[in-house]
Amino acid sequence: MSEMHTRRTVLGAGAALAGAAGLASQAVASHAHAAPRRRTPAPSSVRAADEYVAPDGPEVVDAEARRGAGPVRKVSLTATASRLELGGGLTVPTWAYGDRLPGEAIRVTAGDTLELALANHLPQATTMHWHGLALRNDMDGVPALTQQAVKAGADFTYRFTVSRPGTYWIHPHSGVQLDRGLYAPLIVEDPKEPLAYDKEWVVVLDDWLDGVDGSTPDAVLDELTGGRGSAHDAGHKAARRAADGDAPSRLLAGASSDLLGGHAGDVAYPHYLVNGRRASDPSVFEAAPGDRIRLRVVNAGGDTAFRLALGGHRMTVTHTDGFPVRHTETDTLLLAMGERYDVLVTAGDGVFPLTALAEGKEASALAVLKTGSGEIPPATVRPSELDGELVTADRLAPDESVALTERTPDRTVRMTLTGSMGAYDWAFDGKPYDPAARHPVKAGERVRLVFTNRTSMWHPIHLHGHTFAMAGTALGARKDTAAVLPGRSLTVDFDADNPGLWMLHCHNVYHAEAGMMTVLGYLR
């Protein structure tokens, strides 16, 4: 089923969330807090030197107060074991938010207070991360850093002000749970929306192996790491024991992409999906010829970059990672894991393939735009636009409304990306993740991050709680996720305006779990 909204229903969708208050109120009563208040610090806060701001410290409370408190939008969500149909008769056991893939889009309006009651019906602990949002630190969903993990059978209510419009998404930050079905779009409407369009198409890309021939992400992590699994996730061993030992190998060899600088990925996925559907039985989005359509595209994959194109159409890029850019036309886009792009297209007359090429992996995912008569294209269709003009993030200029002002950095933090496919010892500066180790920053500083990739593989780097500007001869597009190619460096600038302890990591979920994560900590 496609996700289609008219302009009117898009603007009115946030109000529909207000009716989901029942479970939320139960969760508030049974677990956690219904409103921001001082809580027992997470374990890392106890171990950390007193010089760092605590995730629930007064600095965080003050920052949240400055964001204001708009109308409360209440949502209930259940993380549970489920069986999902991926198209063409294939049904798999997995974990998901309810019984659909992706999970139902959460829609709020910028300025709202979002109150989401998460019920954990999974067999292990979980959390929820709000990818791309600048929110209060103790709601960021990183276990043993910003909150205690939500135990199996428990509830937790996340509550915070959503300050900026844009295309975001939710997923766990516990082990390799992201590579199951636990993800959903998060759409923050702009009450002063400047774009004019007739319909909206939310497009979520994914690579899929969970439940196929006994495969699980935990078993794949063990295979990649030679049995070490996750060095810090307590639920990993139990999940691995529950996995079928007869599952086929998922190690990928020979995947190569010039766009990614060489090796394209570690994992051989049996399926690639658009909005939870395989290419043999794609989701179909219906519109009328001449309709102006806004596509909000999210790469929710674990190990796959996607090159995206809509056959017979040029795309106008309007946003990346939730922030507006100067409108730029392109034929195709390259999305790393965690990245989002918003584009506008004017629909032609007919049936058109929206193809997401699994970059370097000799496979693709498919959805279909249908505005007239015609046959559904075959799963292997490859529109010529995939080989046309490609606009990458470093070529985009920020919209003036969000451009970071030029300023000499007060602090430069340099990190070297290290590790190898053979040892699978991915890390920053050769040091695997330790939640008690922090790179210090101070509130009010302009911080420059310099990443140097000494590995033979590309890494999409994601910063929690902030957006940065791509730094070059001039400050570029605002983003929260950006790829660092092998043998290359990436420099980004951000303003330290959101106190707390913030994760910085590779958004290849297997690289992160092997150790390529670290923390930026605000000094008190």
Image: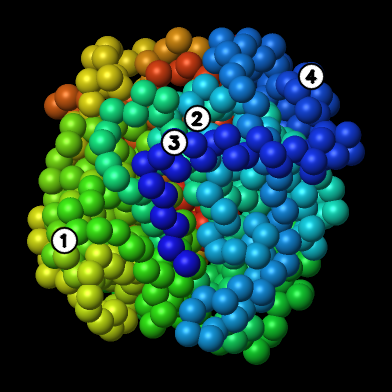
Element class at badge 1: loop
Q: Amino acid at mark 4?
A: Arg
Element class at badge 3: helix
Mark 1 highlights which residue? Answer: 348
Q: What residue is shown at x 77% (from left), y 53% (from top)?
A: 120
Q: What residue is shown at x 56% (from left), y 25% (from top)?
A: 112
Mark 3 highlights which residue? Answer: 11
Element class at badge 2: strand
Q: Which quadrant would residue 262 be assigned to in this image?
A: bottom left
Q: Which quadrant would residue 390 be assigned to in this image?
A: bottom left
Marks 2 and 3, Cα distance to the nearest angstrom?
Answer: 9 Å
Marks 1 and 3, Cα distance to the nearest angstrom?
Answer: 25 Å
Can you tell which of label 4 and label 3 is closer to the viewer? 3
Residue 486 at x, y = what percent? 29, 54
Tell which circle, 4 or 1, labels the residue nearer the N-terminal end: 4
Marks 4 and 3, Cα distance to the nearest angstrom?
Answer: 35 Å
Marks 4 and 2, Cα distance to the nearest angstrom?
Answer: 27 Å
* Towards the viewer: 165 or 219: 165
**Residue 357, relative to residue 299: is it above or below?**
below
Report if residue 304 is visible in the image: no
Mark 4 highlights which residue? Answer: 38
Tell which circle, 4 or 3, labels the residue nearer the N-terminal end: 3
Specify the label residue 109 is tagged with: 2
Q: Is residue 263 left or right of residue 44?
A: left
Q: Amino acid at mark 1?
A: Gly
